[in-house]
Amino acid sequence: MNIARDGFYFLSTPELYRRGMQLNVTWIYSPLPESPRPNYVGKIVRVDTLSQHRCGVAVQLVQPIFA
């Protein structure tokens, strides 16, 4: 739904995500083998209840993961 330099916001089902959870995030995925695939540790900073079946999830990109 929304992308910023240090995070993003997306829609999901309410029971999947909780504030404070950490995620491994592949930022701007491309299936091309020559494309860089920067990976990050993300932290859920907000979960908005939008309806009974939907929620909005705000994720802050905390730090890059170096392979």
Image (cartoon, helix red, strand yellow):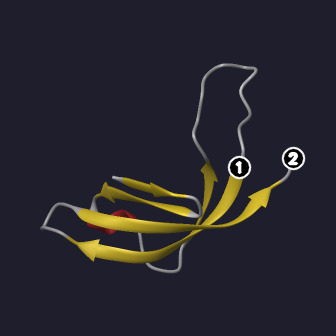
Q: Where is mark 1, residue-wise?
A: 39
User: Residue 13, labelled with which disc?
Assistant: none
Disc 1 packing (10 Å; few <14; some 14–19; many ≥20): some
Residue type at mark 2?
Ala
Q: Residue at x 30, y 56 (%)?
A: 11
Q: Could you tell me if the residues under marks 1 and 2 are in contact, i.e. CB atoms within 8 Å?
A: yes
Disc 2 packing (10 Å; few <14; some 14–19; many ≥20): few
Which of marks 2 and 1 precedes in the sequence? 1
Is 34 situated left or right of 11 in this image? right
Q: Position of residue 23 (x, y in %)?
A: 59, 62
Distance Cα–Cα, label 1 vs label 2: 9 Å
State which quadrant residue 33 falls in. top right
State which quadrant residue 16 falls in. bottom left
Is 6 situated left or right of 55 in this image? right
Q: Where is mark 2, residue-wise?
A: 67
Q: Position of residue 36 (x, y in %)?
A: 74, 33
